[in-house]
Image (cartoon, rainbow, N blue to C red):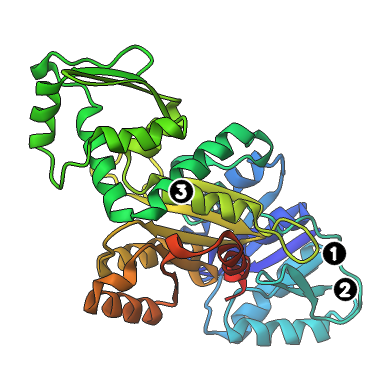
Amino acid sequence: MTFIEFYDRVPLHNVASTLLYRPDRVIFVGDSGKTMSKSIDIYRGIAQNRGINVEYGYRSINKNHLDDIITSLSKIIETYDDCIFDVTGGSEVYLVAVGVLMERYKGRVQCQRLRFKNSTVMDCDGDGNMPEVESFDITIKETVEMSGGRVKSYSRIDREAWTEEFDRDLVAIWSCCRKDPSYWNALLSNFAAICRSRPDLSIEETEDKLYYSFTKKQVDIMLSHNYGRNTFTYQALRVLIDLGLISEVIFLDRITFRFKNHFVKHCLTTAGAILEWYIAKRVAEAKDKSGNFIYHDVAVGVTMDWDRTDDAVYPTYNEIDVVAMRGAVPMFISCKNGIVSVEELYKLNTVADAFGKRYAKRVLVATQLDKYGERCDAVKARANDMEIRVIDNVDEMSDVELNRLISTLWSS
C-alpha cells in the first residue's frame, strides 16, 4: 500500500495515513524538498515509536504548474501499482491533478479524505473499496512531536491508577478552594512562602519533604516577605486537619505540620494546581451518551519544548495547564483561579496554533472572572475573537453542570 500525500502546513494531514493504515510507503509531493526531508525525519520517529516500519520518500514539484504535478504523480503511479491519493491536505491545483489522473488510471488508483472532527474517512472515488482503518486516536506526545516540538514534562491521567483516596483528597481540596478562591490563593501563597529551604533561617526540608517545623518567629519572618495577606492561622489549618490533609499540627511558640502526601503538598503550595487537577479529572471522566470516554488522553502541566533539543542556547518552553485528545483533535485548556490577563489568551492561542493548527480547541476555565468588571469584558471579547471557549465561575457550578459543558467542548 502506497500513500501519496500532498505536503501540507498542517502536520496531522501529513502523518495521519501512516498512523491509521500502517502502509508500506508514503510519498510526499510538495514544492520544498528541504522542508519535506526534515519533516520525514520527525514522522519516521513517531512511526517507529508505534512499531510502524514505513518507507518515506518525496517528490519536489512546482505547485503552481499543473502539467508538472501531473507528470510527477504519473511517474509514482507507474512505479507502484497500489497507490492511494490522500487529499486531506494540499491546494486546489493538486485536486485538479488528482481528478485528471483518476480518470486516466481509472480502477487502478484510489482516493480518500480524512475527516478528523468526527473520525471518519471519505471514499472520494466512490468504489467502496477502502483499506481498513486503525484507531484515529493520537496521543498528546505525538501531537506535539509531529509539529516539531516535544513534551518535556507532564502528568498523564491514568484512570486505572486513580485511587479512591486520591479522588477524595482532590475533592476535599477543591471543596476548600471553591468556597473563596481569593482567600485560598492567599493561603497557598503563605504555604509556599514557608515550605521551602531557608538556610539563612537554619531551616532545611526533611528527608520526605512532608514534615515542617518552625519557631513562630521564623514563620513571621518568612511571611513578612510574602506578597499578599497573611491567612496562615490555626483556624485555616483546622479546616485542613478536619479533612485529613495535614496532621501533627502544633500552633504555639513552635509551629509544625505534616502534609498527607506529596500530591496534597503540591496542591497546597502551588497556585492554581487544584483547579488544574479538578478540571483534568472532569475531562478524563467525561462520557458520551453511549457511556464511552470522550477524551482518550488527558494530561496536567504539559510543558512543550519548541526546539526539540537540549542544546538550544535560548530554549523556548510553554506550559499548558491541561491538554486532552479526542481522536486526533487536541484541546488546550488554560485554568485560572484568579486574575486573567489578555496576555494569557495570546499564549494559549499561540501554543494551540503551533501544536494543533486549525483543529485545536482552545478553552479558558476561570473562577470569579465576572468579578473583575471591565477587565472581564475585555478578556471575554478577546477570547471570542480568538475562538477561545470561556467557562467562567467554575467554582459556583455543580458537578453535573460542569460535566455537561466539558462533554460538549470538543464539538464547539
Q: Position of residue 206 (x, y in %)?
A: 31, 13
Left or right: residue 46 compared with residue 31: right
Q: CA distance from mark 2 to mark 3?
A: 63 Å
Q: Which amino acid type is shown beneath numbered disc 2?
A: Arg
Q: Earlier in the sequence, mark 2 or mark 3?
A: 2
Q: Which amino acid type is shown beneath numbered disc 1?
A: Asp
Label 1: how many residues lie within 10 Å, few (<14), some (14-19) or many (20+)?
few
Q: CA distance from mark 3 to mark 1?
A: 63 Å
Q: Position of residue 14 (x, y in %)?
A: 61, 63
Q: Which amino acid type is shown beneath numbered disc 3?
A: Ser
Residue corresponding to mark 2: 108
Along the viewing direction, whichever of 185 and 291 lies nearer the viewer? 185
- The residue at 36%/47% (across/down) is 307
Based on the displayed image, in which of its 4 quarters is residue 403 positioned?
bottom right
Give the numbered dot on residue 81.
1
Left or right: residue 217 compared with residue 31: left
The answer to whether residue 302 is seen in the rendering is: no
Tags 1 and 2 in contact by the CB under 8 Å rule?
Answer: yes
Q: Quadrant of the C terminus?
A: bottom right
Q: Position of residue 163 (x, y in %)?
A: 63, 33
